[in-house]
């Protein structure tokens, strides 16, 4: 267990790149645990046969599991989750068992005490057989607004 | 006849917060340790930023479909976007009131002949005093039956 360090506004600069956080590799057990905790019981994330019947070679991560990891990174970058005012993500590709999720962020603007952050999470891994995926590609793009103590 | 909105209760408990936090790999004490949460000025442990997705326990997909009537074919549906706007994070021990409605529903013609339908569900969560805690926007994309060539 940890407590992130307090971050103040004067520690941030425009264009600053935040420390990359790498989570995973994700496993099917992570998908099952997230299904139980979140209530997302869509079998496409847990049941091989069902996933294939829906045209996917195998099960894949819930988008919100990936978004949960990215929000985790944002919380830790800025000293805790309570500083978030807005968090938005767009899903660009699926994330598979065996993939690592690499979360990165850049300070885009600081206006009237609100810090705007551009976010990205990439999947890195071989991906399922037969899909011939790139080893490293963007899976989520997003943005966050943060308000910090002075 | 579809309803214009669904109202539901979302209880926030230490157990559901801890389970959710573990499921997204969290290790920040503020999600697990009431003492630490109080030291930081919260009444109890804090829910992670994406915690309110657990609203699916309260209003399952079939019920949402039946009552709000978006008439989506889930064999062709992807989760396109998700957004949260926060006044504060939920804390364990409170019961949030959620109000869900369809905020947007439009179709875009694709470049190659197919079309995509975007449906956004908005959920507004308020606390026992009626004050807004956060709102969530859940955007689904339904791809067309005939994706074109």
Image (spheres, grey):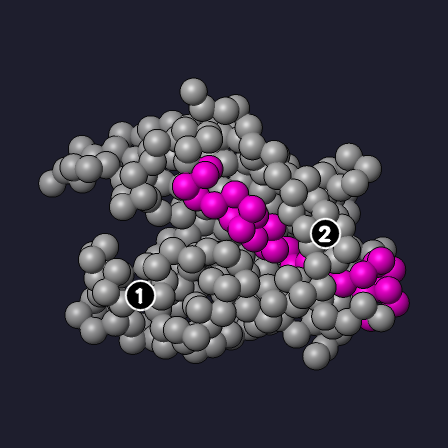
Q: Which mark is residue B71?
A: none
Residue A73 seen in render:
no
Q: Is residue B127 above or below residue A62?
A: above
B26 to the left or right of B67: right
Mark 2 secondary-structure assignment: loop
> Quadrant of residue B73 in the image?
top left
Query: Could you tell me which secondary element the residue under label 1 belongs to?
Result: loop
Q: Which residue is mark 1?
A: A47
Quarter holding residue B111? top left
Q: Residue at x 46, y 30 (%)?
A: B68
Q: Residues within 10 Å of mark 1 (few under 14, many from 20)?
A: some
Q: Position of residue A60 (x, y in %)?
A: 35, 64
| Residue A137 appears left or right of B50 | left
Point out the image quarter for the C terminus of chain A. bottom right
Q: Answer with left or right where residue A106 lies relative to residue B119.
A: right
Calculate the distance from the C-alpha at mark 1 to the C-alpha at mark 2: 32 Å
Mark 2 belongs to which subunit? B
**Residue to which mark 2 is pinned:** B90
Identified at 42% across, 57% down, the residue is A41
| Membership of A11 in magenta stretch | no
- Nearer the observer, disc 1 or disc 2? 1
Tag 1 subunit: A
Q: Position of residue B74 (x, y in %)?
A: 32, 43
On the question of residue B67 being in view, the answer is yes
Residue at the image position 72 percent from the left and 77 percent from the top: A2
The x and y percentages for residue B47 are 68, 58
Q: Residues within 10 Å of mark 2 (few under 14, many from 20)?
A: many
* Magenta-highlighted residues: B36-64
Horizontal side of A94 relative to A8 (left or right) equals left
Q: Position of residue B63 (x, y in %)?
A: 45, 39
- In the rendered image, the quadrant that contains the N terminus of chain A is bottom right
């Amino acid at each position: 267990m940890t407590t992130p360090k307090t971050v103040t506004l004067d520690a941030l600069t425009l264009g600053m790149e935040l420390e990359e956080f790498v989570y995973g590799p994700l496993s099917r057990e992570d998908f099952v645990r997230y299904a139980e905790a979140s209530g997302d019981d869509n079998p496409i994330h847990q049941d091989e046969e069902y996933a294939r019947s829906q045209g996917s070679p195998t099960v894949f991560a819930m988008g919100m599991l990936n978004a949960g990891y990215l929000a985790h990174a944002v919380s830790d970058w800025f000293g805790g989750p309570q500083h978030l005012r807005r968090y938005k993500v767009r899903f660009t590709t699926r994330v598979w068992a065996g993939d690592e999720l690499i979360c990165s962020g850049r300070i885009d603007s600081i206006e009237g005490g609100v810090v705007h952050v551009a976010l990205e999470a990439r999947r890195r891994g071989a991906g399922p057989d037969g899909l011939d995926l790139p080893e490293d590609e963007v899976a989520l793009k997003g943005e966050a607004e943060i308000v910090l103590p002075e | 006849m579809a309803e214009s909105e669904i109202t539901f209760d979302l209880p926030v408990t230490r157990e559901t917060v801890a389970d959710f936090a573990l499921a997204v790999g969290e290790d920040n004490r503020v999600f697990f340790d009431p003492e630490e949460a109080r030291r930081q000025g919260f009444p109890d442990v804090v829910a992670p930023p994406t915690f309110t997705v657990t609203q699916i326990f309260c209003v399952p997909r079939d019920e949402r479909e039946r009552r709000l009537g978006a008439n989506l074919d889930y064999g062709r549906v992807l989760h396109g976007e998700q957004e949260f706007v926060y006044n504060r994070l939920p804390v364990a021990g409170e019961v949030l009131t959620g109000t869900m409605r369809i905020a947007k529903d439009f179709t875009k013609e694709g470049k190659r002949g197919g079309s995509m339908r975007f449906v956004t569900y908005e959920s507004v969560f308020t606390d026992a005093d009626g004050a807004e805690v956060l709102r969530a926007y859940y955007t689904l994309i339904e791809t067309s039956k005939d994706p074109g060539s």
